[in-house]
Image: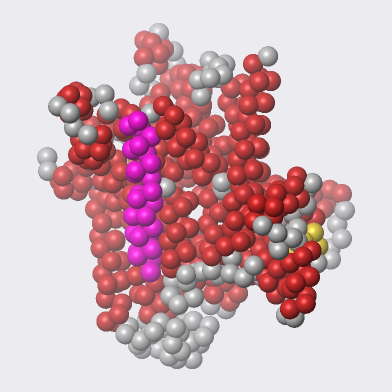
Amino acid sequence: MPYVSLILGRIGKAVIVLLAILVFNFFLIHAAPGDPAAVMAGEAGATDQQFLDDLRERFGLDQPLPVQLWRYMSGVMQLDFGYSYRQQMPVLDLILDRLPATLLLTGAAFVISLVFGILAGTLAAMRAKRPSGSIIMGLSLLFYATPLYWVAMMAVLVFSVMLDWLPAYGYSTVGAGYTGLAHVGDVAVHLILPALTLGLFFMAVYTRMTRTSMLSVSQQDFVKTARAKGLAPGVIQRRHILRNALLPIITLAGLQAGQMVGGAVLTETVFAWPGIGRLMYEALMQRDYNLLLGIFFFCALLVILFNMLTDVIYRLADPRIKEGVA
Amino acid sequence: MSFFRRFAQNRGALVGLIILALVVLLAVLAPFLYPDSPWRMVQRPFLAPGEMAGFPLGTDTMGRDVAAGLAHGAWVSLLIGLISTVVALAIGVPLGALAGYFGGKIDDALMRFTEFFQTIPNFALAIVLVAILQPSTTSIVAAIAIVSWPPVARLVRGEFLSLKHREYVEAARLVGQTHRDIILKQILPNTLSPVIVLASLMVATAILLESSLSFLGLGDPDTMSWGYMIGAARTVMRQAWWLSVIPGVAILLTVLALNLVGEGLDDALNPQLARQR
């Protein structure tokens, strides 16, 4: 059962990374100016010494640091990420409430960027020596160099303010009370701009990667053999070159997933998309450190889950890869 | 062919170099062109570009001169991009060199460490670091450097792995050079060209990161930056679109120029690769 031990190994590695992030979070909150009690008291709007001392005792801040670290870690193990005084809710509830919107946005952006990126990259590789290939690469460089949040704002300016085709912000029409299919359609219309702008940057990354990968595969011996056999160029491109060129892209896609969660902070801020990215912005504005670190932990968790998924896909796509090679 | 002729053969790189030179010029001249603080209110707010002589790019929501902000912001962007890249190199190059040269357990441990930093979402980590350490030029530079060194370490490690068994390295070992001398004087100089190319692209990414942080309100509160200008203009996009368009174009051009220069450097420093393309 190679897959079972493989997956177990991955899970073990992921747990170590997550534990390390927790330790990192713990020391980070202690690096913040004022101890957590002062931060919390500030969030709760209280200043008197008695309240501070109570807080310190309640959260064990009068204990030695290792004891505090242990308490923090065991709290998280029981899914206790602390309390957000600003929002008057447990951090976990806040995050779980916003998670679906982010998964929808990043998922849509991921599919868009991957599909169009591979398509554009393939075209650019097939037309490497023609102007159309250069135009695709020029455009991808342009998208690569544009700040994500600025593309989002320009998209709002053009498609919402000037043309009035698409809604500028939000998840659904406020007060419309759509149900069923109408609601799905409403959300989809709101999703178009955020998903496209978030996907654009990553599309540029995949385009460049696909092109490079295809060009390097096309120089390998088995492609020359296929040409010598007289196979049609289209068949060679699809079945010989593209299939093999896609492998490194799967790995890259896994790595990019993390960047996408980060990018979602910017996109969700511009479009007022009610996901954890927007929540992170709110936590920033309110200096709500408990919430901020909780979101950070969830971002990392998402990335790790996604990396594990791409790892499995990679091994399914390329049976030559056996355990111990990677 | 000389280095510069190879560089100039890539026309995009030449264009990039010219744009970059203009941005550098703007940054350097900023204190002379606009000696006053770019935060000062100088005219009534919401002047459109060209509406009033002396304010070619207009004024923002608080009546500050947009052109002055643009010039001072150029300085901030370039400075933070450059310094954070240097710091990232200072972390990544030694780690990669040690891992690649010694291999074995040292390599394992250092690469685990690198992998850990690659797993954590970059931008989220930068946000958390700057927010908790409080926004300042130092914390921004530190955050950008901390999220951008892993690719350097990986690149340098790979170079060291492929170079450490070359004959000239074996020869240096045979005549009894110390590890330190072999690493610093024999191998490291030969890894420079890919590192330079990577570094030029890293400056571009660092500028994007800095602008994104300031857009979210995490910029140094004492310095005017392009990202801050866009963030401040977000709420008035309908009334004054140019306030967000102008600094955005500035970022776009600078980052684009750096990427083009990076590609040109790649062609010039790795001529064999360039011919294959």
State the image coordinates of residue B43 (x, y, percent, origin top left).
45, 91
Q: Is A261 situated left or right of B266 in this image?
A: right
The residue at the point 44 percent across, 50 percent down is B148
The residue at the point 47 percent across, 40 percent down is B114
Most foreground residue, A242 or A42: A42
The residue at the point 42 percent across, 47 percent down is B149
State the image coordinates of residue A110 (x, y, percent, origin top left).
61, 42
Most foreground residue, A70 or B18: A70
Q: Is A268 situated left or right of B18 in this image?
A: right
What quarter of the picture does the C terminus of chain B occupy? top left
**Is A280 drawn above or below residue B182 in the view shown?**
below
State the image coordinates of residue A96 (x, y, percent, origin top left).
77, 51
Task: Identify the image quadrant of residue B128.
Answer: bottom right
Q: Magenta stretch containing residue B77, yes or no? A: yes
Most foreground residue, B80 or B29: B80
Q: Is B237 situated left or right of B30 in this image?
A: right
Q: Magenta stretch containing residue B148, yes or no? A: no
Q: How many numbered marks does the figure carry?
A: 0
Dominant secondary-structure state across the stretch colored magenta = helix
Q: Is A287 situated left or right of B100 in this image?
A: right
State the image coordinates of residue A230 (x, y, percent, origin top left).
40, 10
Q: Which region of the structure is painted magenta? A: B76-102
What quarter of the picture does the N terminus of chain B occupy? top left
Furthest-left residue in view? B1
**Is A199 drawn above or below residue A83 in the view shown?**
above
The residue at the point 41 percent across, 82 percent down is B38
Task: Identify the image quadrant of residue A30.
Answer: bottom right
**Is A222 drawn above or below residue A219 in the view shown?**
above
Most foreground residue, A52 or A77: A52
Q: Is residue A290 visible?
A: yes
Q: Is residue A156 visible?
A: no
